[in-house]
Image: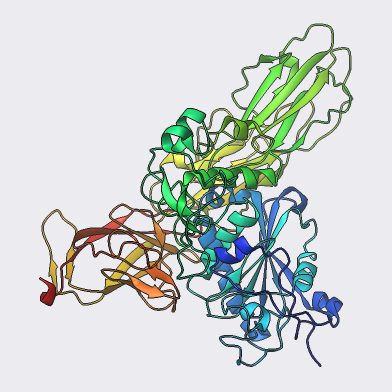
Amino acid sequence: MTSPGIRLRRAAAGLTTACLLAAGLVGAGPAAAEPPTGPSALAAAATVVPIQTTGPADKRFNLVLMGDGYTAGELAEFRADVDTHLNVLWSVEPFASYRSYINVWAVEVASPESGVDCDPGLDAPRRDTALGMAFWGGCNPSSVQRLLTVDSGLAGELADLVPGATPSNRQIVALANSDTYGGAGGSYATASGGNALSSLITPHEIGHSLGKLQDEYDYYGRGVPGGAYEGPEPSSVHHTLLTEEQMREQRAKWWRWLGEESESGGVIGRHEGGMYSTKGVWRPSRHSLMKTLGYAFDQVEREVMVEAISAKVNLVQDHTPNADPIGADRTVWVDTLHPVGGELAVVWRLDGRTLATDNARTLDLRGLDLSHGVHTLTATVSDPTPFVRDPAVRASAALTRTVSWKVDPKRTTRPEEVAPAFTGHTPTGSPVGARSVVHADTTHPLQRTLAVGWRLDGRAVVNPGNDRDLDLGSLRLTPGAHTLAARIPGTDAELTWTVDARQATAAYELSEPLRTIRRPGRPVEYVYDGEFTMRLTARDDQQGHVVSQFRVDGDGWYTYYGWPTDADAPFRFSPSGTLIDGLVYGKLGRSRAVPWDDATPDYGTHKIEYRTIDSAGNTGTARSFLVTLVPPAGAR
């Protein structure tokens, strides 16, 4: 008997041309679908595993990962692939700072056979799998190998198993049990689970589907320059025809970020090429995640993504009921979200006058001595993140919410017993990073304000103002493991976390140089007259995949993934870069992404830095070495 997914050839729903190109996936559509054979049996065989729970699914952005072509004996490999993909995602801003807005679910279902269809070629055996994933756009000879599709109906059915997750608040990512490069994006995203580059496809595709970001490629098909752009001013926020002077004069596009060092390397300005055109249109940065997998979102894209992620949730998670006027003999409260990267701000106003509440989430009305008459009380919750500079974005519902109440001193509040207890809080099951914000919310008695006291390694922590959040970064923790506790004074209610303040360690291994130079007070220098390889390895005392990164001559940090054709192979640097499937990798010095970029070797001495980001979010201290590239003997 065949499995529910065998021979299904429906492509993932919502796969736009832009998103297919985002993973370098250009080609014809998949072959026609065959009728499904018992999808209810598929759902019955699946298991939903919560990987990260930050709140109720209907109040979070839900990332739903599922695997295809993993047999029952290979589900451990699926879990390892999920761990790698997630930790790469958490190493990219703004996902790192807003991971607390995201629930992550793995839907596990075993396939009868290992692998997926048409991998690596059209003549490869068809596999009996749960979700019918296939390369070549569903085994279509008119497509391309790297277009990896999934049956959209079955993927949606598995995602529907997550209670509270709906098409409007979720992102599906289907991982194929394959080491072949491939993927696709849109409302659903696909990627090879074990390929070197596949974990970098996910944040790029979410940039498309969630942030509506456009590709910054200057080609449509790999290896073919895109020509000149001839359209009007693009609607894309990160593409323009304007000069820098015009952007400033018109206060248009990314004028607020001009001249700043780009998060993805270089300086934010005006860099030609994008939207599949080589000439005539400009982007903010030389390279970013929307142009080259491995780099970060630049500030322009990051601002868009902050708004997009925040728009999927509500900064105000709950509050004192406000349908009817309330009395002045009680407390009023708001429960907010809690970004990992910083605290939200709460401002209370009475009849338009700002109250001195020091960012508290609870206000005791009895201390206001209200006059007769009905008053208007408001609590405005906002996100002061430096990732956003556009006032319109900051004032939008994504980053600012206001709750209002009518307060009538003549009303009497009926007493109600509310036991002191913790409600929402940072998950305690895994270590938290040494620079993260940890939170603990409580119940809300009507006649008093509950306090939250914090202790680190048994010692009280001074935490003025909003006591629901504690910014560990402000404590400058010594390296090692620490114990953090939150307690409601006078009760037995207590939460504890392990704080991981020990950085993951990194090491490099290079191929044999012509010579090695060691000088006092300088990093070790290695001399080469041609290509060389670099392997980065990381070790941590905690579980979870550790992301390694490197950068050359202060350019943007680049995620280390091995080599595009083999995750276990070291990264290869060469004077002009290596051409693989229409893209260029590993040019030493000034980077090169496509064959028509400048291939002139950058001879001389270059500084290579490397660092780690562990599963708790700790970014390790960067270390460095020098490489001097000299011309080959025959060229000198």
Task: Tell me where residue 592 appears, x and y as whole percent.
Answer: 36, 63
Residue 321, compared with residue 428, is above or below; it is above
Q: Nearer the viewer, residue 110 or 127?
A: 127
Which residue extends farthest front? 230
What is the quadrant of the C terminus in the image? bottom left
What is the quadrant of the N terminus in the image? bottom right
Query: Which residue is pictured at 68% across the width and 22% down the height?
Result: 348
Q: Quadrant of residue 380?
A: top right
Q: Nearer the viewer, residue 380 or 277?
A: 277
Task: Tell me where residue 426 appears, x and y as whole percent.
Answer: 62, 48
Q: Nearer the viewer, residue 238 or 105?
A: 238
Q: Quadrant of residue 631?
A: bottom left
Total residue callouts = 0
Residue 28, compared with residue 187, is above or below; it is below
Determine whether, in the image, residue 250 is placed left or right of residue 367.
Answer: left
Residue 320 appears in the rendering:
yes
Task: Tell me where residue 178 appears, x and y as whole percent.
Answer: 57, 81
Residue 467 appears in the rendering:
no
Task: Tell me where residue 169 appears, x and y as whole percent.
Answer: 73, 53
Residue 509, compared with residue 395, is above or below; it is below
Determine whether, in the image, residue 136 is placed left or right of residue 591.
Answer: right
Query: Which residue is pictured at 42% across the width and 78% down the height?
Result: 568
Q: Nearer the viewer, residue 284 or 305?
A: 284
Query: Which residue is pictured at 28% across the width and 64% down the height?
Result: 588
Residue 493, compared with residue 135, is above or below; it is above
Query: Which residue is pictured at 65% across the width and 37% down the height?
Result: 488
Q: Quadrant of residue 486?
A: top right
